[in-house]
């Protein structure tokens, strides 16, 4: 982009207006099932601000919910059937609730079926053998394949609907656990629970400090809008290549590092500062395993400091330090954990060069998205600079979103 070019106003993809999304999903429900839904429920996608690849080492993460959400219109029936339609797919699919089976799961409906299956015992306690059924229409606005937890937003919206319509009385944490079970045991996908925790438990204007050792959480004030700031999300559109094998390899490396250090997980490897960290890592002979351990140990400390900085005086007063922590996180993921790809690095480097306070990849890596902490009125310019860098490198055009910390799952008024 030249110094005098004007960025396209349509460069940033906005979430739909809430009223428009509600009207659309209600209308589709009525067209599909011939009556109005009993209620509409929604749950957000998420970005992880900092704390990457530490969940499986009992680390700390700091996610936040985004404004892009999944909406579910639903009604209770007496058919004993789970009937499902998606605005993003054709046709109505149905299965008897009593016959839900992970062995037959597949496609997007596995995430819906899995939640009902995970709550089956609670449904039986409440409903007995009354043959309660559910009709659901799903309309998702969390971008697919961008690492923003579209599957978790679907699961969590369904969990809200099932709980409310069947009077299950589940707690938020019980719904989180049911959604984790749905993804891991029914849909057969890997999740550490960060996504579901963020989608259910986040509050507007806050991030969520998640301790992966015991799944305790604490809201952390993160008032971006009030400080004239925003998170710019760049969906790099990079295909996730070999991600499953690479993820398994990184997890195995971190487990090896913990074993070599004689601790259950790397979270237990105590060190009081850089010198003590260097002494600790010197006990690992293999250079690759040593780098993996260094990332996990330093990333956990970056989350702790990010939390301390926010608690000490807010975002605006400490924006430079927050940016430094974001930058250090990405550099560690690129150099020590080796989970970035060219698209992620190009997006981060271009954002920094265009004036972002800090930028990093978010999610598991090997594709997906980046985030950049930017002045709200400069977001369009930073996005345009990233787009120009992609053009210069011959990469497919990215997609951009602005993120402000949003509310978690719940019923729509």
Image (cartoon, rainbow, N blue to C red):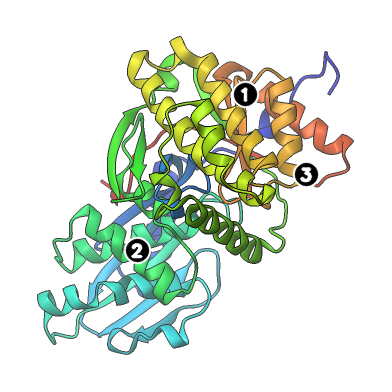
**Dot 3 surroundings within 10 Å: few (below 14), some, or many (20 or more)?**
some
Per the image, the residue denoted by label 2 is 179
Upstream in the sequence, badge 3 or badge 2?
2
Residue 390 position in % (x across, y down): 81, 38
Q: Nearer the viewer, residue 256 or 302?
A: 256
Asked which secondary structure carries label 2, the reply is helix
CB atoms of marks 1 and 2 within 8 Å: no
Residue 87 position in % (x across, y down): 50, 64
CB atoms of marks 3 and 2 within 8 Å: no
The mark found on residue 342 in the picture is 3
Quadrant for the N terminus in the image: top right
The residue at 44%/53% (across/down) is 262
What is the spatial separation of the Cα atoms under label 3 and label 2, in whole angstroms? 33 Å
Q: Nearer the viewer, residue 222 or 164?
A: 222
Q: Is residue 67 above or below residue 151?
A: above
Q: Position of 192 compared to 364: left or right? A: left
Q: Which of the 4 image quadrants contains residue 279?
A: top right
Per the image, the residue denoted by label 1 is 379
Residue 59 visible (yes or no): yes
Q: Nearer the viewer, residue 310 or 268?
A: 268
Q: Which of the 4 image quadrants contains residue 118?
A: bottom left
What is the spatial separation of the Cα atoms under label 1 and label 2, in whole angstroms? 34 Å
Residue positioned most to the bottom: 99
Tag nearer the camera, 3 or 2:
3
The residue at 41%/52% (across/down) is 263
The mark found on residue 152 in the picture is none
What is the spatial separation of the Cα atoms under label 3 and label 1, in whole angstroms? 22 Å
**Dot 2 surroundings within 10 Å: few (below 14), some, or many (20 or more)?**
many
Upstream in the sequence, badge 3 or badge 1?
3
Q: Nearer the viewer, residue 58 or 130?
A: 58
């Amino acid at each position: 982009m030249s110094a005098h070019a004007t960025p396209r106003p349509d460069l940033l993809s906005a979430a739909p207006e809430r009223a428009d999304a509600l009207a659309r999903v209600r209308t589709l429900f009525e067209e599909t099932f011939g009556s109005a839904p009993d209620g509409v429920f929604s749950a957000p996608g998420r970005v992880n601000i900092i704390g990457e690849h530490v969940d499986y080492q009992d680390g700390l993460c700091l996610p936040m919910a985004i404004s892009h959400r999944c909406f579910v219109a639903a009604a209770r029936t007496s058919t004993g059937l789970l009937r499902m339609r998606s605005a993003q797919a054709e046709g109505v699919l149905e299965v008897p609730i009593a016959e839900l089976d992970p062995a037959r799961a597949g496609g997007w409906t596995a995430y819906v079926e899995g939640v009902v299956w995970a709550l089956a015992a609670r449904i039986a306690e409440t409903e007995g053998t009354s043959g309660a059924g559910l009709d659901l229409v799903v309309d998702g606005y969390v971008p697919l394949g961008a690492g923003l937890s579209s599957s978790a937003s679907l699961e969590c919206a369904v969990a809200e609907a099932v709980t409310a319509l069947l009077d299950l009385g589940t707690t938020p944490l019980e719904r989180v656990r049911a959604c984790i079970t749905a993804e891991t045991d029914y849909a057969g996908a890997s999740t550490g629970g960060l996504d579901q925790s963020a989608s259910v438990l986040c509050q507007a204007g806050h991030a969520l400090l998640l301790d992966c050792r015991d799944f305790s959480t604490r809201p952390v004030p993160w008032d971006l809008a009030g400080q004239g700031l925003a998170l710019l999300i760049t969906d790099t559109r990079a295909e996730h290549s070999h991600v499953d094998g690479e993820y398994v390899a990184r997890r195995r490396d971190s487990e090896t590092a913990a074993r070599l250090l004689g601790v259950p997980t790397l979270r237990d490897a105590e060190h009081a500062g850089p010198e003590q960290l260097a002494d600790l890592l010197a006990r690992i002979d293999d250079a690759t395993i040593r780098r993996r351990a260094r990332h996990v140990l330093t990333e956990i400390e970056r989350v702790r400091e990010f939390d301390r900085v926010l608690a000490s005086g807010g975002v605006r007063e400490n924006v430079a330090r927050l940016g430094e922590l974001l930058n250090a996180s990405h550099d560690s993921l690129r150099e020590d954990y080796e989970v970035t790809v060219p698209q992620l690095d190009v997006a981060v480097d271009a954002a920094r060069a265009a004036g972002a306070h800090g930028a990093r990849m978010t999610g598991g890596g090997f594709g997906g998205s980046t985030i950049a902490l930017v002045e709200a009125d400069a977001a369009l310019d930073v996005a345009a600079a990233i787009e120009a860098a992609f053009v210069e490198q011959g990469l497919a055009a990215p997609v951009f979103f602005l993120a402000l910390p949003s509310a978690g799952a719940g019923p729509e008024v």
